Image (tube, rainbow, N blue to C red):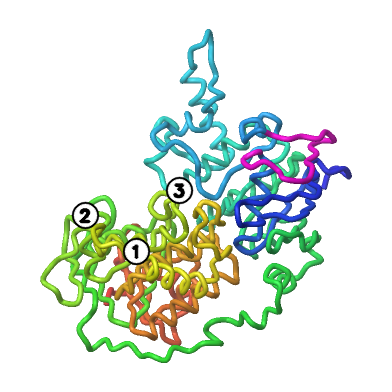
Amino acid sequence: MTGSRPVLTMTGISKTFPGVRALHDVDFRLFPGEVHALMGENGAGKSTLIKVLTGVHAIDEGTVVLDGERVSFSGPMQASACGVSTVYQEVNLCANLSVAENIFIGREPRRFGAIRWGEMRRRARELLARLDLDVDVGSPLGTYSLAVQQMVAIARAIDVRARVLILDEPTSSLDAGEVAQLFRIMRQLRDEGIAILFVTHFLDQVYDIADRITVLRNGALVGEYRTGELPQLSLVEKMIGKELDVLERLDEQQQRTTAVRRDAAPLVDASALGRTGAVAPFSLRIHAGEVVGLAGLLGSGRTEVARLLFGADRADHGTVLIDGGGTQVRHPGQAIARGVGFCSENRRAEGVIPELSVRENMILAMQAARGWLRPIPRRRQDELVDRYVRALSIRPANPDLPVRNLSGGNQQKVLLARWLITEPRLLILDEPTRGIDIGAKTEIQRLVVQLSDDGMAVLFISAELEEVLRLSHRVAVMRDRTMVAQLDNDDTLDADRVMRTIARATSGGEAVR
């Protein structure tokens, strides 16, 4: 830390929403020239603390002092103007505008009232060069991946010359190389005296980059610690409020009880399935009770495979048959009717409906399958919603709350419950544990194993290779939008072998089987 006086002090912060006490008497300090990790389970109050700081929500009680002056921002624009800039987990930019326009929106260089487009593009290229990002700044942002969009959002935050930079799950859509680039920039900004508030669920990243850690649990402050003085085991115990022995490694604690019968007819049979410009034709069979993991680097085509199997994208090659049926899956309605559920990685654009309640979001898929002229009786709704609120530990356990009032991790659980209610035969999970704390992640992993043991087929996608290996019977490896191998998850399969398969040229790689 370059200064002995905090640049930001939050004292006695409390915030209550209808039926939810999100924060209670929380204190927080942030010093110049430090990276400070804000840690806690989903629903602990991390995002709420950020939003009351930046004026998204009004503070019920407490004070905020910035550079020695008490402040109360009316919204993020005012906070940014005062040097507090935020990059949220869900990228909140305009996909139809260019990269340069997104970086400088509201701050465009002008002369005599006219935007100086050449100057704006030049400054955008220079700014992105600091992030080692080489893209066409004149192209629409929506043509780039979520990872690039995340880096553009960070570039915009850096350019406003913030004294306080808040990064809320900035690495959730980045691969290892991009995380390393981001950390290099964070260290550079820290050395320049900028105070960085860093929110993440990746413990290794916290110990790689953070100088201090503040832990929240159930909306209350647990404590503030120097990173080097708080072992990872102690951090996790403080986050979950119990000893870590209840969260033993899944592969040591719970063994599968059901063997997959590959000699039986497959539940899902994709043959030469592909889409030009998205993913090369591939063949994949998934059997009842089998968990098939999709492994590959960011942009390798994992999500594209999932969307083709569900019919969300229309294939221009091959077929998808469910249970040997003669009807191909061409759109999501057919997939749902044949027992396929799809939990998208993009919960904001393709998942939850913020204005609807937790209950309404959870029964949406089941109601759609029944048809809107056959409404689900309220008593049946209550039974289903109560079961999955308890099974997934959704917090707060109030089904009538607008889902927007839940943390990102709990919204992810609501999406998972939506599909489990339909009792699918194949459940496609695209990054179901991204942005979810270690306790919730373990719960979902256990649930995947239980569903598999009960006979459900699961296609599991995760950027965390160890998670894929822990859960899957078989791993399909993606590289450059091509499925280059399918590997049985036996005693010989480990992360090194999968990474070697990804790195190997297709012509020299392991055969797809």
Give the CA separation, mark 3 to mark 2: 29 Å
Tell me, yes or no, whether the two marked residues, 2 and 1, touch with CB atoms within 8 Å. no
Residue type, numbered disc 2: Arg
Sequence-earlier tag: 2 or 1: 2
Sequence-earlier tag: 3 or 1: 1
The residue lying toward the viewer, choosing from 99 and 68, is 68
Query: For the point 47% across and 29% down, which residue is it?
Result: 101
Q: Residues within 10 Å of mark 1 (few under 14, many from 20)?
A: many
Note whether 75 is above or below 5 in the view shown. above
Residue type, numbered disc 3: Glu
Q: Which residue is mark 3?
A: 355
Name the mark on residue 342: 1
Q: Position of residue 456 (x, y in %)?
A: 34, 79
Q: Quadrant of residue 376?
A: bottom left
Q: Quadrant of residue 421?
A: bottom left
The residue lying toward the viewer, choosing from 229 and 380, is 380
Tell me, yes or no, whether the two marked residues, 3 and 1, touch with CB atoms within 8 Å. no
Note whether 12 is above or below 243 in the view shown. above
Note whether 406 is above or below 326 in the view shown. above
